[in-house]
């Protein structure tokens, strides 16, 4: 008896062809089997509304009834691929598309991902920066992440966006003690991440903008020869004159500092201080604000720590509505207005943290494997940057361009990230050659305006 041959039905990939083109720069980072699973997970993460779990990604890709779902989990918790190599390619890809020349401004900041569970070993108890205020302290359980984001001008948005490319986990002290490892502080993690980013951008000038958490003498001493660091400065910081020149034949150790200077709080209170009034076109919230400034150079010194030559900038509100602020820059030749304009770009990363929670489901993941945790959150933050680049590439065509989604009660002139992800979803849901007609002789077609409205509704549900 001759056995009948069973005809194999070709498997149609659920991944749109355009996504293969978009993700082509990252193909060398993965093996072929892992790459196929990564494509499905990325497409599902973009299209899925609500939670960003592996099961939700498989459902939206139409694979809920397919066996072998464990392979998709293994792509995150077991497969061998280098997240740092992916971050390097992402950084170069972002700069090639949106910032091929000039200096590179990188914002660095930490965020708390609120997570609970005994099996999440790296979690700790931290101050919740979103729910806390000056007079109200709120603690939360979660994971602390340190993110580096390149700040680039996005043409279709008409403003700068902060696009994450490298995110590292900063485990708690309890985790370090339990694993017998030396605990790395947040500034230690920042030093390694900044120097790593500079090695990737050896031929570009790098300016790092950070908040007061990173105003540490140890960090300044470690990175000042490689990057320009701009951060906040305490009003009571101990400032000194530069060390005097050493006389011929003078004995003893070289002096680290000169005469002490008045603290910036005293400069602020001194009625004889000469202020310069400037107008900042892009202050916080994109507002134009009039400010009084004064600047100078000094040596910031603290006992048993390396001295740091800095340029300080003191800013006050002429109306007195806001508190005075001070900033420092490790580039002594930089103009005070240039220092302020670069530091204001740091706030964009706070907007990024808010939008990845709202539109990409950060804090809805359910992995408890250490490796999966270290990969999933950085992947979602990196996906924010990729969606921005993909939306930028859709602008030349009129039918795929990003447009602001407005209403009678909500009018906006420029697109936001919600509009960018909606445009990308429309392209993924309706690839070229897409048709809603049946294959029978009796064709039923959905009118184009109704179909467009239906797809837009789906795209804006997340």
Image: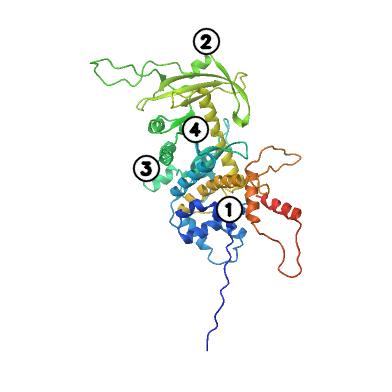
Q: Is residue 38 above or below residue 213?
A: below
Q: Is residue 101 above or below residue 362?
A: above
Between the C-alphas of marks 1 and 4, the distance is 30 Å
Specify the label residue 182 is tagged with.
Answer: 3
Residue at 63% x, 28% y: name it: 287
| Residue assigned mark 1 | 45
| Residue assigned mark 2 | 272
Q: Secondary structure at mark 3?
A: loop
Pointer 1 local density, CA inside 10 Å: few below 14, some 14–19, many at least 20: many
Q: Position of residue 52 (x, y in %)?
A: 58, 52
Q: Are marks 1 and 3 in contact (CB under 8 Å)?
A: no
Please tell me whether mark 1 or mark 3 is closer to you in this view.
1
Near-viewer residue (448 or 224): 448
| Residue assigned mark 4 | 209
Q: Is residue 82 above or below residue 299?
A: below
Please tell me whether mark 1 or mark 2 is closer to you in this view.
1
Pointer 3 local density, CA inside 10 Å: few below 14, some 14–19, many at least 20: few
- Sequence-first disc among 1 and 4: 1
Specify the label residue 391 is tagged with.
Answer: none
User: Residue reaching furthest top?
Assistant: 272
Residue at 38% x, 48% y: name it: 179
Answer whether residue 124 is visible to the viewer in this image.
Answer: no
Q: Secondary structure at mark 4?
A: strand
Is residue 234 left or right of 432 when viewed as pictured? Answer: left
Q: Position of residue 237 (x, y in %)?
A: 45, 23
Please tell me whether mark 3 or mark 2 is closer to you in this view.
2
- Sequence-first disc among 4 and 2: 4
Q: Are marks 1 and 2 in contact (CB under 8 Å)?
A: no
Between the C-alphas of marks 3 and 4, the distance is 27 Å
């Amino acid at each position: 008896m001759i056995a009948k041959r069973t005809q194999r039905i070709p498997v149609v990939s659920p991944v749109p062809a355009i996504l293969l083109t978009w993700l082509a720069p990252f193909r060398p980072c993965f093996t072929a089997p892992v790459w196929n699973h990564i494509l499905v997970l990325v497409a599902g993460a973009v299209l899925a509304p609500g939670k960003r779990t592996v099961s939700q990604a498989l459902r939206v890709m139409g694979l809920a009834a397919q066996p072998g779902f464990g392979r998709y989990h293994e792509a995150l918790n077991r497969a061998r691929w280098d997240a740092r190599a992916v971050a390097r390619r992402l950084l170069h890809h972002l700069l090639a598309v949106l910032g091929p020349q000039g200096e590179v401004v990188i914002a660095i900041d930490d965020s708390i991902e609120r997570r609970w569970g005994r099996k999440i070993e790296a979690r700790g108890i931290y101050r919740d920066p979103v729910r806390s205020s000056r007079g109200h302290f709120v603690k939360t359980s979660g994971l602390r992440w340190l993110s580096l984001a390149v700040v680039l001008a996005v043409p279709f948005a008409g403003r700068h966006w902060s696009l994450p490319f490298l995110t590292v986990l900063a485990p708690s002290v309890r985790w370090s003690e339990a694993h017998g490892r030396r605990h790395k502080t947040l500034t230690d993690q920042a030093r390694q991440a900044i120097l790593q980013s500079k090695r990737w951008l050896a031929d570009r000038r790098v300016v790092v903008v950070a908040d007061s958490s990173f105003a540490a003498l140890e960090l300044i001493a470690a990175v000042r020869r490689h990057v320009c660091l701009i951060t906040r400065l305490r009003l009571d910081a101990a400032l000194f004159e530069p060390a005097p020149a050493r006389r011929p034949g003078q004995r003893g150790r070289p002096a680290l500092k000169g005469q002490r200077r008045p603290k910036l709080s005293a400069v602020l209170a001194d009625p004889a201080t000469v202020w310069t009034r400037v107008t900042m076109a892009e202050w916080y919230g994109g507002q134009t604000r009039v400010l009084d400034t004064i600047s100078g150079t000094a040596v910031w010194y603290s006992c048993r720590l390396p001295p740091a030559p800095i340029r300080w900038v003191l800013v006050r509100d002429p109306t007195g509505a806001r508190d005075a602020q001070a900033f420092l820059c490790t580039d002594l030749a930089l103009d005070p207005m240039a220092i302020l304009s670069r530091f204001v770009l740091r706030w964009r990363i706070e907007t990024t943290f808010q939008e990845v929670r709202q539109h990409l489901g950060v804090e809805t993941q359910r992995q408890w494997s250490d490796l999966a945790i270290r990969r999933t959150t950085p992947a979602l933050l990196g996906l924010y940057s990729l969606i921005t680049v993909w939306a930028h590439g859709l602008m030349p065509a009129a039918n795929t361009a990003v447009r602001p989604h407005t209403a009678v009660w909500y009018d906006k002139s420029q697109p936001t990230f919600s509009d960018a992800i909606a445009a990308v979803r429309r392209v993924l849901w309706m690839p070229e050659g897409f048709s809603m007609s049946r294959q029978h002789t009796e064709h039923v077609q959905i009118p184009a305006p109704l179909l467009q409205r239906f797809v837009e509704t789906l795209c804006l549900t997340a």
